[in-house]
Image: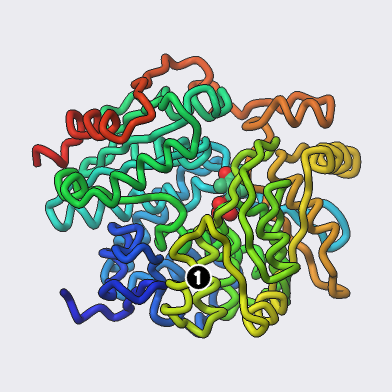
Amino acid sequence: MREDYRLRYVSTRGGAAPLGFCDATLAGLAPDGGLFVPEQYPTPVDVAALSGKSFEDQALTVMSAFAGGEISDQDLAADVDAAMATFSHAARTPLVQIGPNEFLLELFHGPTLAFKDVAMQTLARLMDRILKARGRRATIITATSGDTGAAAADAFRGRDNIDLFILFPEGRVSEVQRRQMTTIADDNVHALSVAGDFDDCQRIVKALFVDRDFNDQVAMSGVNSINWARVAAQITYYFYAGLSLGGRPVAFTVPTGNFGDILAGYVAKQMGLAVDQLVIATNKNDILDRGVRTGSFVPGTVTPSTSPSMDIQVSSNFERLMFDLSGRDPASIQSRLADTRAGFSLTEDEHAKLTALFASGRCDDVLAGERIAKTYADTGILVDTHTAVGLAAADMAPRREGVPMVTLATAHPAKFPDAVEAASGIRPTPPARLAHVLDAPERATPVAADTRAVADVVLARSRAVTA
Ligand SMILES: *Cc1c(COP(=O)(O)O)cnc(C)c1O
């Protein structure tokens, strides 16, 4: 074990040795089932010095603070620059005004038209760099309900030291999402269409993760939103938006599923950004909205909605917030979260701390549709269904006089064209970069919803096995 990490990452469950940034990035999940968090947040960041800087320059400051000296600023800058060069807008994540003191932060100008591109494009380059420096290869196996797999396929295609296997539920992702995964021609990307649902895909990936022999054989790594480097890469756009508004206190509303995106806003505040309030927006899968109101988080069954990337009942990244709310007490996290399906409760003190910073709002499919139509009527801007859930939650949130509200626009409307057209009567125009995806030949490997069957495909194809 190395002892010389300048910034150590500890597990929220206290049962894993602390790691440095590079090791935590490759590991994804901590071996004790917990999530890695920095031992302390890098603070204070010189917020004033970031003002007026480009997205890339701000991102370098943020990523450098988390890398703890393990990757040089020159190398980090190269990866951040290359990642953001895949975005089709010069501002990368432009802030757009939609009303008096109301803004949209457009995070969907990346290759797969959802906010996950910001972090995934950065993560792919960092992982490849870390592996290359160590002369190693890795295999990434990920389950997706759509957007994560698409973002990963684009970000990891052609990477020398990484093979990517994406498990998606056959017939249950949108056509655009499926095509974004199956039209990648690079040999290191493998789309597996699983004869089952998303839960089957996730169950198989988890089973492979805990199979130590298999894990060692293929050098398995994870890129879902529990990977700290992804959270870190998402922090920048909070700074970027807050500083674009002059650095005064700003409220953010975030369409939320796994709690990764909004957690980045929380960390930005810990690093010194003036964040007045964070509003958790949920669709009818509303465990977080109920939890914020009552302090008790009881998962129901997942109900499909028009905002599928938020159809989640167990939000993995909430564990990181809860770790802080508990006063960083790993034993209390371990005892309450070991069985996430059972639900958990916050203490009164934790609940008070939660509601001091977070508010929440719930928006069903009907209200989301109405909000798409209203936004179009008010501004001429078409928003996607996830963003609409955010806007509706922002409407409900208690507001402080004069504080700007920034709602995160997490997907391009053309990614969910049917729901957007049904709500507004307008078919969103696909951006030029989608054209290739819409007519390139598809390639997917059908596989049974069975752990062994998936393991066999991975063993036969991963370059890490023979390396
Ligand atoms: C993934 C996703 C979300 C939810 O983000 P979390 O980090 O999981 O909370 C919201 N909107 C879109 C479009 C997404 O792809």
Query: Which quadrant of the figure has residue 292?
Result: bottom right
Query: Which quadrant of the figure has residue 331?
Result: bottom left
Residue 432: x %, y % from top left: 58, 26
Question: How busy is the neighbourhood of tag 1: few (under 14 within 10 Å), some, or many (20 plus)?
Answer: some
| Residue underneath mark 1 | 336
Residue 460: x %, y % from top left: 17, 29
Residue 108 in view, yes or no: no
The amino acid type found where label 1 is placed reads Arg
The colour scheme is rainbow
Q: Where's the C terminus, which quadrant?
A: top left
Judge by depth and name the residue closer to the eye, 300 or 51: 300
Residue 431 in view, yes or no: yes
What's the residue at 55%, 27% (across, down)? Answer: 172
Residue 162: x %, y % from top left: 25, 43
In what element is the residue under mark 1? helix
- Beta carbon of the mark 1 residue lies under 8 A of ligand 1: no
Compared with 74, 418 (above or below) is above
What's the residue at 34%, 31% (across, down)? Answer: 450
Q: Is residue 197 left or right of residue 91?
A: left
Compared with 281, 244 (above or below) is below
What's the residue at 72%, 72% (across, down)? Answer: 277
Q: Is residue 105 left or right of residue 78?
A: right
Q: Where's the N terminus, which quadrant?
A: bottom left
Q: Is residue 295 left or right of residue 323?
A: right
Looking at this view, name the residue that lies furthest to the front: 342
Q: What is the count of numbered marks? A: 1
Query: Which quadrant of the figure has residue 335?
Result: bottom left
What's the residue at 59%, 71% (across, down)? Answer: 266
Judge by depth and name the residue closer to the eye, 186 or 227: 227
